[in-house]
Amino acid sequence: MTSFLFLLFKPVLFLILKKFFKKQMKAWIVSALEWLALQTDNEIDDAIVRRVKSAMKLGVV
């Protein structure tokens, strides 16, 4: 019975979690990309981080 209820409410639970943690996950991904770009001395990494940050400010991602 418990597994049936879990299967019934699982999609709703995931939708709620996705909507709630969307901004926090985006911020975490950007900070992880920035940290990774700092570890390497490569202009391509810096350009990717700038592009992702600008896309997130526009609301594309």
Image (spheres, helix red, strand yellow):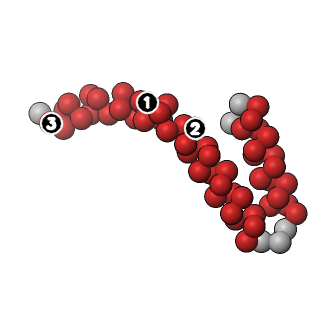
Mark 3 packing: few (<14 Cα in 10 Å), some, or many (20+)?
A: few
Residue kind at label 1, given as amino acid type: Leu
Q: Position of residue 6 (x, y in %)?
A: 24, 35
For discs 1 and 2, the disc positioned in front in the rendered view: 2
Q: Which residue is drawn at 67% across and 51% down?
A: 30
Q: Which type of secondary structure does the marked residue at label 1 adopt?
A: helix
**Spatial distance from mark 3 to mark 2, Cα to Cα?**
32 Å
Q: Earlier in the sequence, mark 1 or mark 3?
A: 3
Look at the picture and state if 13 lies above or below 35.
above
**Quick check: can you spot residue 33?**
yes
Mark 2 packing: few (<14 Cα in 10 Å), some, or many (20+)?
A: few
Is 42 on the left or on the right of 27, as rendered?
Answer: right
Q: Which type of secondary structure does the marked residue at label 2 adopt?
A: helix
Residue kind at label 2, given as amino acid type: Lys
- Name the residue tied to disc 2: 23
Tell whether label 2 touches label 3 (CB within 8 Å): no
**Spatial distance from mark 1 to mark 2, Cα to Cα?**
14 Å
Q: Residue at x 85, y 54 (%)?
A: 47
Look at the picture and state if 45 lies above or below 5.
below
Quadrant in which the C terminus is drawn: top right
Q: In which quarter of the image is residue 59?
A: top right
- Name the residue tied to disc 1: 15
Q: Where is residue 58 in the image (x, y as percent from the top left)?
A: 76, 31
Q: Quadrant of residue 43?
A: bottom right
Look at the picture and state if 59 lies above or below 28.
above
Q: Which of marks 3 and 2 is nearer the N terminus?
A: 3
58 or 2, which lies in front?
Answer: 58
Quadrant in which the N terminus is drawn: top left
Mark 1 packing: few (<14 Cα in 10 Å), some, or many (20+)?
A: few
Return the residue found at the far right: 43
Tell whether label 3 touches label 1 (CB within 8 Å): no
Residue 2 is marked as 3
